[in-house]
Amino acid sequence: MPDNCLFCRILKKEIPSKAVYEDDSVYAFEDINPQAPVHVLIIPKKHIATLNDIKQNDPVLAAIFEVAKKIAKDRGVADSGYRAVFNVNRDAGMAVAHLHLHLLGGRAMTWPPG
Ligand code: 5GP
Ligand code: ZN
């Protein structure tokens, strides 16, 4: 677990965060700079840098999407709609190199994204 990884530090509670959901393999918390009324980050507890680094059939990926479904339902956006986004590396504007699914909802969004 890299000492300098921001989200590993959040997992170690060295940096506070607003928890939304937690189990053995996944943690979800409020984004500090929300881009929509619902903006939750869902991360694996083990350090994985990006989607490129996920091993085939790693169950944590399905776990992350199950948590996304649950939070979307709990926050009342499952039917109105939401985005579930992994940014990967530079061109996607990835700022924190610890895999995180952005769950964004609660407002109408445009396509294509910027
Ligand atoms: P990325 O651009 O890497 O896909 O997204 C990183 C996200 O992490 C951004 O939406 C940013 O607002 C969020 N973020 C950055 N630092 C912190 C922090 O210290 N706490 C929380 N809760 N979110 C953070
Ligand atoms: Zn990490």
Image (cartoon, rainbow, N blue to C red):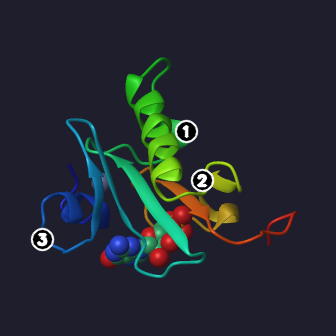
Tell whether label 2 touches label 1 (CB within 8 Å).
Answer: yes
How dense is the environment of label 1, judged by Cα within 10 Å: few (below 14), some, or many (20 and up)? few
Decide if residue 65 is on the left or right side of residue 104: left
Q: Position of residue 114 (x, y in %)?
A: 80, 72
Residue for point 87% across, 63% down: 112
Q: Secondary structure at mark 2?
A: loop
Residue 95 shows in this picture: no
Q: Position of residue 53 (x, y in %)?
A: 47, 36
Name the residue nearer the viewer: 83 or 52.
83
User: What mark, if any, has residue 14 been given in the picture?
Assistant: 3
Which amino acid, mark 2? Val
Which residue is labeled 1 in the image? Answer: 52
Q: Secondary structure at mark 1?
A: helix
Tell whether label 2 touches label 3 (CB within 8 Å).
Answer: no
Residue 30 shows in this picture: yes
Which residue is labeled 2 in the image? Answer: 88
Name the residue nearer the viewer: 77 or 1.
77
User: What mark, if any, has residue 114 been given in the picture?
Assistant: none
Residue for point 51% across, 68% down: 39
Residue for point 52% across, 41% down: 69
Decide if residue 95 is on the left or right side of residue 82: left
Name the residue nearer the viewer: 110 or 59.
110
How dense is the environment of label 2, judged by Cα within 10 Å: few (below 14), some, or many (20 and up)? some
Cα separation, mark 1 vs mark 2, equals 8 Å
